[in-house]
Image (cartoon, grey):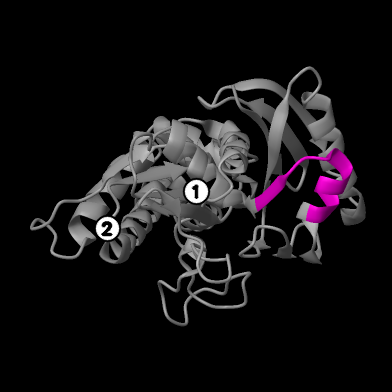
Amino acid sequence: MALTVGVDIGGTKIAAGVVDEQGAILERVKLATPHDSAQVAATIAEAVNTVRQGHEIEAVGLGAAGFVSADRATVLFAANMSWRNEPLRDRIEAMVNLPVVVENDANVAAWGEARFGAGSGRDNVVMLTIGTGVGGGVIIGGRLLRGHFGIGAELGHYRAVPDGLPCGCGQHGCIEQYASGSALTRIVKQGAAREPERAKILLGLGDGTPEGIVGSHITVAAREGDPVALEGFTEVATWIGQAMADMTAILDPGVIILGGGVSEAGEILVAPARKAYQEKAPAAGQRPLAEVVVATLGPDAGIIGAADLARDRGM
C-alpha cells in the first residue's frame, strides 16, 4: 500500500499526516509554526520525520498559502510567511530525503474534497472556502486547474464590484470583500449598530456593543433566530450564490463544494446561497446546475489532498 505524507502549513500551526491510498490518515502530528519564517522549513521537516517513523513513505506533499510556481517547487509569494521565491521543495527534499511536491493550500484542500470528500467520484468540481477571506480550487476533467504560471484559481480575487471595497490584494471590489467571514462580521456589526433593538441576542453574546460581536456569536445568534444575524447570513449567501453563478458560466462544474469556517453554519448559509445561485445563473431555469454541497473532510482536507497529490505528482 502506497503511503505518502501530507503537510498543511498554516500561519499558526503545521499539521502533518501519513495518508493511505483511500485517503485515511494513519498517523498525525501538529507543531506550532515558528515566528521566524527562516525556521519554518526545519519545522516542516521535523513534522514529516515524526510521522514517518515505522512507515515506508514514497513522497511528501506540502500545502502552502500563497503563489506556487508551475513546477510545484517554489513559493513565489506568501504574505503570512514573508516568503519570496522560496525554494521550498528543494529545502525539504534535502532535509527528509524524499520526493516533495509543493502546492497552494486551497488547491490541496479542494483536491482532498474532490478525491475523498464531498466531491468524490466527480471530475468537474469547484470548491469555495469561505473563511476570513474566500479561497478555493478548481478541478476540471479530473485535473487541478493551475494556469500557465501555477497561480490560477485565486477565486476570492475576481472583481465582483468594480471600484468596490478595498481588498488586501491591492484591488477594489474582490468577491472576498462581500462573501467571506470577515464580510459577514462587518455586515452584522453595522446592522447591530443601526438597529440594536433587533440584535438583542447578538449583543447579549458579546459585551453588549456591536464592536464586541465575533464570528462565532453570529452563527449562534442566527440559530436562535436573531434577525440581524440571519439577515447578515442571507446577504453573504447571496454574494456566494452570485460567485457560484459566475463560475458556472465559465467552468460548468458538476458540483460546487462550500468549505471553511462560515460553511459550518449549515443550511443557514447554504439554503440562501443555493437559492441565489439558482436565480443568478446564466439562463436560469433553462440549464442544468451544479449540485451545491458542504465539505466533509474539515481541517483534514489539506493533509489528505497534499498527500494524494504527492502520490500522483503529475496531477
- Residue 60 x, y percent position in the rendering: 70, 39
Position of 27 relative to 12 (above/below): above
Is 110 magenta? The answer is no
Is any atom of residue 221 visible in this view?
no
Label 1's element?
Answer: strand
- Residue 168 x, y percent position in the rendering: 63, 69
> Which residue range is magenta in the image?
90-102
Q: Nearer the viewer, mark 1 or mark 2?
A: 2
Please indicate whether residue 32 sits to the left or right of residue 169 in the image. Answer: right
Could you tell me which residue is drawn at 69 percent across and 33 percent down? 58
Mark sitting earlier along the chain (1/2): 1
Residue corresponding to mark 1 = 129
Label 2's element?
Answer: loop
Viewer-proximal residue, 301 or 134? 301
- Residue 3 x, y percent position in the rendering: 64, 27
**Which residue in the rendered view is the most extreme toward the bottom?**
163
Residue corresponding to mark 2 = 252
Q: Which residue type carries mark 1?
A: Thr
Viewer-proximal residue, 210 or 32? 32
Q: Which residue type carries mark 2?
A: Asp
